[in-house]
Image (cartoon, rainbow, N blue to C red):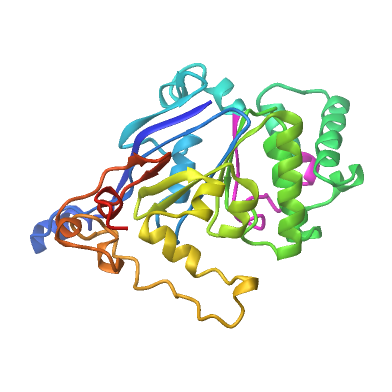
Amino acid sequence: MVQALDLAKSFDVSPPLLDRVLEHRPRRMLHAVDGVSFDIAKGRTLGLVGESGCGKSTVARLLVGLYRPTRGSFSFDGQDAHAAYRSAGARDLRRRIQMIFQDPYASLNPRWTVEAIVAEPLREHGMARRGDAVRERVGELLRSVGLVERDMQKYPHQFSGGQRQRISIARALATHPDFLVCDEPTSALDVSVQAQVLNIMKDLQRERGLTYLFISHNLAVVRHVSDEVGVMYLGRIVELAGTHRLFGQPRHPYTRMLLEAIPKLHDTGRARTPVQGEVPNPLDPPAGCTFHPRCPYANERCRQERPALLEFEGIQVACHGVEEGRL
């Protein structure tokens, strides 16, 4: 269903031209995403994890057409999606690909009623125009996410964070999409509310055969919802594997570091390994493997040569140590 190949996105963060000329400074480019590749089969979920600033949300915006890639391609159901976004068929593709945003307090228009918010994509795509048909469809969508029809006349400020996110999910489902890009949809919610929203999303996936890209920094959430997991670091995927395989036998040192930092019930009393070091400045990333300043297994090759994402025993890993058998 979804295939990303060498996706990259760079942003020009240079000072104004006059300042650069007077101070003899070159242009500066921020490589937010730098060669990301993955596949998602129909009805499956790929989780993307990593520290803040690693490029997860930029990947999401590339897939839904909010950003145009600097290089690389994205195919959806066999067609070049980025070419389709610029063609006459863009409306049909946007109907099939929808996004759930991170902050339910910012992604809903506070001046609109819930009926207007959920009905907007229906009217935009010509799926329902008459008032009765629109209200009936909005009521169905609200019921599918655990809300009631009388909520249609309310405004976003009258709902809790979890209920607002349910409204966002209902809006995303309005056009009968095949692929949902979920950009940290539960990060702003309490733990108990997170579980409710995640269970709703899993039930909807089973009922409708939805395909998800689920972005999060919460490894427990990703483990619960994902079939495969990709670990990102400074704009690149450093490990990609099935969920059980990745959590049971992590290969990349960065993945191991993230998993070691999770508190475990059966390890009560054992000292936890904190995540070491700081993420380098993305405007001036280290040479070679970008993780080598924080990696206890780095050698001279790691400092000079950037590792490629290679397959080892069914797991894709970008690490010289794994390639050489040192880990």
Q: Image quarter for residue 295?
A: bottom left
Answer with left or right where residue 137 lies relative to residue 188: right
Q: Position of residue 229 (x, y in %)?
A: 51, 46
In this view of the protein, which residue sits in the foreground, 102 or 202?
202
In this view of the protein, which residue sits in the foreground, 199 or 296?
296
Q: Is residue 103 located in the magenta-colored stretch of the structure? A: yes
Quarter in which the C terminus is drawn: bottom left
What kind of secondary structure does the magenta stretch mostly adopt?
Answer: loop
Q: Is residue 295 located in the magenta-colored stretch of the structure? A: no
Q: Residue at x 80, y 40 (%)?
A: 115
Q: Is residue 72 above or below residue 51?
A: above
Q: Residue at x 65, y 29 (%)?
A: 177
Does residue 117 appear in the picture of this structure? no
Q: Residue at x 32, y 42 (%)?
A: 309
Q: Is residue 103 above or below residue 133?
A: below
Q: Is residue 273 above or below residue 58?
A: below
What span is colored magenta in the figure? 97-116
Q: Position of residue 123 (x, y in %)?
A: 71, 27
Answer with left or right where residue 127 lies relative to residue 57: right
Does residue 100 appear in the picture of this structure? yes
Q: Image quarter for residue 59?
A: top left
